Structure formats: structure tokens, C-alpha cells
Image (tube, rainbow, N blue to C red):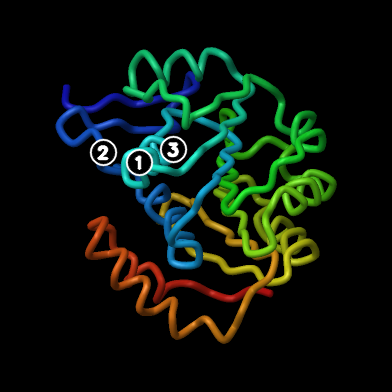
Amino acid sequence: VNSRELRFGNKVIQSVFSKIKPRYLVLPYTRCMLLSLIFCPRPDSILHIGLGGGSIARWLHYEFSSVKQSIIEKNEDVVEAAYRFFEFPSDSRLQIFNADASKLLPKMSEKYDLIFLDAFNDFGAPKEVKQIDFLRSLYCRLKSSGLAVGNFWTLTGDFKEQCESWGSIFSTVYNLDANKKGNEILFGFKNYKIEEEIRYENISKILEKRHQIEFQKMKMRLIKLY
């Protein structure tokens, strides 16, 4: 077997790790979430809500040698699995909080360049991370130029409602369909600068060449919602 998969007792794949290409992001939605790098190409600090197999955090750790990342993961078994089966690195630049993000986030004081919201249970994002109060806490934890990136699932039937919630909190919201299985990515900006859009095009070309990820094709599929 050339890969390992994380599932929560059903057929839904939460994370995939390639033993042949350990740094390759197998699931399309993970690459789509990294489109956020065209808006923030040199992140210093990143917060992840939800760990899974740690694919995105692991990739960022190796691709950006100085970035510091914090991860909030409620399930301690998931943390153990990430270290044991998915080669998640143990390093001072990676800090894991085994906690409920809805309770911990309002108490935090640090601000981040990027926040990845990728908390999933058996079928979709838990209700706690969909609440307006949680999104307000998320917004407060962003630097003035920061953005939040959320992974959602249309199969839960409330994606339109989530878009509206993000639109009420963030200054600008973009959407990217990640795959045909229902993953949708939202990009929420604290302060969007429309005059930077020409620069984003150039950055996407540079990042694609550097990281071998299809940034330009993904950028073409971005839709502005708010």
C-alpha cells in the first residue's frame, strides 16, 4: 500500500498521505486552500483549526523554513494518528493545542497572517465552527492584512448559509469549488485591497513554478461572493 488514509469510521476520507511522495498534497481541496498564498505569499504565523493527518501544516512547515504554526485539535486520537501514521513533524515551529477551538479561540491574543478552518467530524464541519460568534473570534485573531480559509461541504445542505455568515463578518469573501465531491473553499479577508489584483496574477505564476501546484488554474475559478 502506497498511501495512508484517515477516516472516522465511515467511507469519508479525511486525509491522505502518500508514502511515495510524502510532501505531495493528494486531496484537491488541500491544494485549493493553499491558493490563499497568492494573497499572503510570505506568511510568518499561521493558525489551523482542525489537524486531520496534518497535510497542509506539514507542507507549509517544509516549504516555508521560518513560518510558525499553531494547531487546535479537539480529538487527541487524531493528534496521535498524525504523529504515528502521517509523519507529522515534531518541531518547535509547530504547536498543537488539544482543545475545543470554540472555547480556546476567544481566549487567545496572538494574531495570524493565515487561519485555516478545516475542522471536520464524521460528516462535515461541526456546528460550533459555523456560529457567528466563532467567526467573530476568528476575525479578531487575524492581522490587519490576514485572511481566513475555510473548507466546507455542500452535502450538509447549509453551505449557502455559511457563505452569508462569512459575508456578514469579513470585508470580502471569495469562493472556490475544490472538487465534484462537494468541498467548497471560502476565503475571508479582513481588509481586501482591490488595487493588488494585478499583483496577485504575477504571484500565482511565481508560486506555481516554485511549489508545483496549479495556482493559475485555481485562481481562474475564484468567484467573488461579497
Q: Picture coordinates of residue 91 (x, y %)?
A: 42, 24
Residues at discs 1 and 2 in contact (Cβ within 8 Å): yes
Q: Which residue is mark 2?
A: 23
Viewer-proximal residue among 12 and 62: 62
Few, some or many C-alpha atoms within 10 Å of disc 2 (few <14, some 14-19, many ≥20)?
A: some
Q: Left of 196 or right of it: where is 55?
A: left
Viewer-proximal residue among 64 and 96: 64
Q: Amino acid at mark 2?
A: Arg
Position above or below: 99 against 84: below
Residue drawn where x is 68% and y is 35% of the image? 126
Q: Picture coordinates of residue 222 (x, y %)?
A: 48, 72
Residues at discs 3 and 1 in contact (Cβ within 8 Å): yes
Residue 52 visible in the displayed image = yes
Q: Which residue is mark 3?
A: 57
Q: Name the secondary structure under disc 1.
A: helix
**Which image quadrant for residue 4?**
top left
